[in-house]
Image (tube, coloured by chain):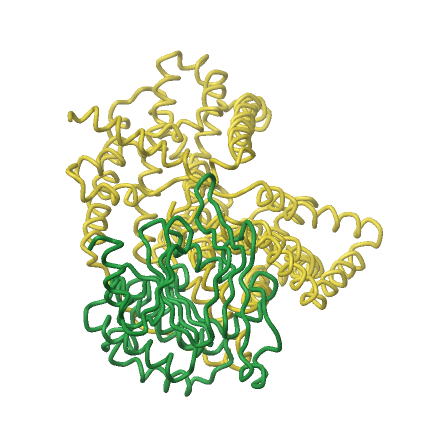
Amino acid sequence: MNKYRLYRLLTEQQELKDKRHPMFEKNRFMKILMWFMVLYYAAILLLMGAMLPMGFSGMYPGVAAFHVLDGALPWLLLVDFWIRFIVQETPAQQVRQYSLLPVRRTFLMNMYLLRTAFSTGNLFWGFMLVPFGAICVLPLMGWGGFLSWMLGWWLLCVANGLCYLLCRALCMKSFLWLLLPLAVHGGIVALMLVPDKNPLDIPCTMLMYEYAKGNLIYIIGAAALIALFYWANYALQMRMVCNEVAKKEEVELKSTTQMNYLNRWGALGEYLKMEVKLRMRNNQVRMQFLVGIALIVFFSVVQYFSDVYSGAFMSSFVCMYDYIILGMMTLITIMCYEGNYIDGLMARRESIYALLRAKYYFNTALLIFPFLIVMPLIVTGRSSLWMNLGYMFMTAGVMYPMIFQMAVYNNNTLPLNQKLTGKQGNTMQQIVSFVALFLPIALEKLLVLLLGDVWGYVALIVVGCIGIATHRLWLRNIYERFMARRYANMDGFRASRNS
Amino acid sequence: MKIQIENLKKSFGEKIAVDIEQYEIKDGEMLGLVGNNGAGKSTLFRLMLDLVKADGGRVLMHPSVEEQNQGIVKGSVDVAQTEDWKDWTGAFVDESFLIDYLTPDEYFQFIGRISGRKQEDVDAFLQDFEQFMAGEVVGQKKLIRNLSAGNKQKVGIVAAMLLQPKVLILDEPFNFLDPSSQSAIKRLLVDYNKKTGATILVSSHNLQHTVDICPRIALLEHGVIIRDIDNTDRQAATELENYFEV
C-alpha cells in the first residue's frame, strides 16, 4: 500500500473513531451544540475582527490599528495555548493502537504530528484576523502585505500548537511539567501587567510588521521555530510510545499514602481516601484539578494587577468562577470516572451513597483553596470578603446540590488516564454547566439589590448553610434516583468503557 | 443460601441471552456453569447480581433456617428489589469490579473496611491465600492496573471471598491463571464450600476444572439450561465431552 492510501485509510479510521463513540452516536444534542459553539465563537471572532479596527483607531489615534493588535500578540498566543488543553488531543495515543501493525512508526508519528500541526483548528483565529486584516492591513500594505501578515500569524499559531503538544506530552510523564508553562506564561503576564509600559508591546508590533512587509528572514525564523518544536515533539513522543509499547515505564509506586487519619470515619473514610487517590493517581483527573487551580491563580493575578475585572458584573463573575471552577471541572462529569469500576461498586450495599457523601465532603473541603488564593485580593481590598464568603457557601450549599444531580443522569465512562476528545458529555451536563455559572450571579444581584451589599451576601451565606446542613437529605434523594435509573446508567457506562 | 430463578428472561435485540423458566440452586451447593461463547453465562451472573435489567422474571435468595436464626436475613430476597443480598454475596465477573488505581493491599483494605471488617481480620484472611497469590500480589507497590492479567484475576477472586460470603459468584475464575494458581483456587473453593457451607456458582470453559470441583453442572446454550447434570461422582465428564465433542 502506498503512503497516500495508507494516510487516507488511517485518516478515515480516526474520523470513524470520533463518529462512532457511543455517546456521540447517541447524542444528537451534542452534535448540534458542537456546531452551534463553532458558529457562535466564529461569529464572535468575526464581529471582533470587524469592530476592533474602529475601536483601536478611537483609542490610539495616529497608530495603525493592526499595530495595536500585533502588540497584543502574547495575549492571543496565551489564550490559544490554554484553550488547547480543552480541545486538542495528543497524538501519542493515536500512534499506539497501530504500533504493532506492519506500518512504520515513523510514518505514523509524522502523519499525526503533521495533521495536528497543520490542522484547520490553527486557522480558527482567521475568523478574526481576516476581516481585521482586510480592514486595516490591506489598504496600507496591499495584498502582498495582507497575505504575509496572515502567514506570520498562522506560523506563530502552528508553533504555539506544537509548543502545547510538547508540554502536554511532558505533563503525561509528570504533572509537575505543568509548572513550566505556568511559570513562563505567568512571567510573560507579569511582564505585561506590572510595569507602567508593556515592554513586549513594541517588539511584538515590530515582529508582525516585518511579516506584513514580507521579510523572508522572519518567515524562515518562524519556520525554524516550528521545525524545532516538531523535532522535539517527534523525539519525545516517539520515545514515550516505544516505552509504552514495551511497558518500560515505571510501574512501581514510589510511595503509598496510608491516610490513616481518615480511618476514624470508617467506610466513609475509605471512600474519601478513594477520592484523594482518584486525583493523585490518574493523569486525566489530576490534570483537570491542576488546570482548575491554574485558572483560579490566573484570574486572581489578572485581578490583582489590572482593572480588567473591576466592573460590577465581571468582579462577581470572576469571584463565582473562582469557587465553582473546581466543582465544574470535576463534578459535571460525576460518576463518569467511576464508570470504569461501576460493577464493583454496585455489588456493595449503598456504596454509591457513601461515594456521593465522600465526594461532597471532599469538594466542599477543596473550597478552601480558592479562598486562600484570593486572600491577597481580599486583604488589599480588590475583592470583597462578604462576596467571597457568600459565593463559597453558595457553591457548597446551592451549586453543589445542583451539580450533584448529574450523578443521576451521567452514564458515559471517561478514561482515567487518557485525553478527553471533547465529544463526550450529554445534554444535561451542558445545561448544568451553563446554569452553574450564571444562576448564582443572578441570585446575588437580586439579593444585593433587595438587601444591600452586606446583607445580600449574608443572605447568600444563609442559603448556602441551609444546603450544607441538609446535605444528607438531598444526597439520599440523588442516590435513590440513581438506583431507580441504575440499569440504564450501567448499560451506558459499559457501552462507553474502552471506546 | 438457596437461589431460585423464576421465568428469568433477557434479550439483546433479537438475540435471547437468558431464558430460564425455573431453576433452583440448593443451599451450600457448588454449581458449575458451562456453555459455548454467547451461551449467556455472564449475562445470567449479571442478572443474579442485579447488574442488568431482566426483561422478565426474578432471582430470589432464600436463607436457610440457620442463617435466619443468625439474623442474617429474615425472609426471601428478590435481588432486584432490595440491596440486602449484597451483604452476603461476593462476586467477581470482570475487571470492572476492580478499582485499578489502588494497590491490591489498598483494595483489600477498602473492601474489608466498607464491609465492616477489621484490618487484623483482613490480614489474617489474606494469609490463607498466600500460596494462591504466590507473593506477587500483596505487599507490592504496584497499582492493580499495572498487574498482569493473572494477578488482576487473583485480586478479584480474593476480594470476592474476603467478605466470607454466603453466596459466591465467579465468572471464569481459571482464566489467565497459571497451572499452580488454577490448582490452588480449586482447592480454596472446595475448602471454602465445605468450611462455610456457602453456595458457590462458577462458570468456566475449562470442563476438567468444572468437573473436578462442582457436584452439579448446568449446561447453558442460547440462554437456556439444556442439561442439569449430576456430578457427585464426577460422572459428568463423559457427557460434557460428548456434548462439546472434545
Q: Colour of chain A?
A: yellow
The residue nearer to you, when weighing A405 against A22, is A22
The answer to whether residue A383 is visible is yes
Q: Is residue A74 left or right of residue A169?
A: right
Depth check, front residue: A352 or A51 = A352
Q: Which quadrant of the rendered structure holds the C terminus of chain A?
A: top left
Horizontal side of A116 relative to B168 (left or right) equals left
Q: Quadrant of residue A484?
A: bottom right
The percent coordinates of residue A296 (x first, y second) are 53, 54
Residue at x-position 56% and y-position 80%: B72
The residue located at (43%, 54%) in the rendering is B43
Q: Is residue B238 left or right of residue B59?
A: left
Camera sees residue A304: no
Total marks shown come to 0
Which residue occupies the foreground of this view, B53 or A62?
B53
Q: Nearer the viewer, residue B98 or A57?
A: B98
Locate residue A407, reporting x and y percent: 58, 55
Q: Residue at the location (38% across, 54% down)?
A: B226
The chain whose colour is green is B
Residue A330 in the image: x percent, y percent?
A: 52, 54
Q: Is residue A89 above or below residue A470?
A: above
Q: Is residue B213 above or below residue A379?
A: below
Rendered view: B190 above or below A394? below
Toward which corner of the image does residue A231 lie, by quadrant?
top left
Could you tell me which quadrant the N terminus of chain A lies in?
top left
Residue A195: image location, x then y, percent? 48, 47
